Image: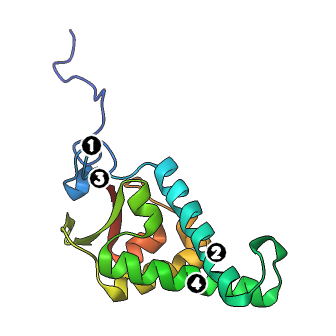
Amino acid sequence: MASSATPATGPSGEFRHPGNRLGLPKDGPGSVATWGRRVLALVIDWLIAGLIASALTGRPMWAGGNNYSLMHTTAFFAMSAILAGLVGSTIGHRLCGLRVAPVRDSTTYPGPPGLLAGIVRSLLICLVIPAVVYDRERRGLHDLAAKTVVVRR
């Protein structure tokens, strides 16, 4: 005699897609950003910070050096912390159609996450490791610490 219980064949109600537990849609505006868009936004921001550092140090981006590297990282940190925290997106995020949304009590909110969240997030991104360790919601340790998530506009 066959059992009346059917085996689970799909994802559980807890995890259907990245962002499901935060009440975010699977696709379209408000959905969790893909890795491709996030990496492209990061590269754009890093290049812009390099241009700023070049202008301030008088050295081209490809010349490198200790003073240039420190200025490049400082420019990236400041730009990322201020823009992500107070505006909700960096220049790279804007160009890639992304924004940083605050998460409170497993719910995302419109508007920017705030300067403190921007600082925490940017500091951890500059350390690299927290940004590459992430959960199934596509939130890196920097997003978890800042209580943010990167979503599509």
Residue under the point 46% across and 73% down: 142
- Single out the residue that lies furthest toward the top: 1
User: Furthest residue to the left?
Assistant: 4
Q: For mark 3, give the secondary structure.
A: loop
- Give the mark toward the camera: 4 or 2: 2
- Quadrant assignment, res 129: bottom right
Picture residue at 43% right of the left edge, 54% below the top = 96
Disc 4 packing (10 Å; few <14; some 14–19; many ≥20)? many
Question: Between marks 1 and 3, how big is the CA–CA gap?
Answer: 12 Å
In this rendering, does residue 139 appear at all? no
What amino acid does circle 4 point to?
A: Ala
Q: Earlier in the sequence, mark 4 or mark 3?
A: 3
Ranked by sequence position, the earlier of labels 4 and 2 is 2
Residue 5 vertical position relative to residue 33 in the rendered view, above or below: above
Q: Which residue is mark 1?
A: 28
For image coordinates 28% across by 29% down, the residue present is: 8
Q: Which mark is drawn over residue 75?
A: 4
Residue contact between numbered discs 1 and 3, judged by CB atoms under 8 Å: no
Mark in front: 1 vs 3: 1
Residues 62 and 136: in front is 62
Sequence-wise first label, 3 or 2: 3
Which label number is shown at residue 140? none
Task: Of the two numbered discs 1 and 4 on the same chain, state the one appearing first in sequence.
Answer: 1
Q: CA distance from mark 4 to mark 2?
A: 9 Å
CA–CA distance in space, label 4 to label 3: 31 Å
Q: Can residue 66 be spotted in the picture?
A: yes
- Residue occupied by mark 3: 19
Using the image, determine if residue 73 lies above or below residue 1. Answer: below
Asked if labels 4 and 1 touch by Cβ distance under 8 angstroms, the answer is no
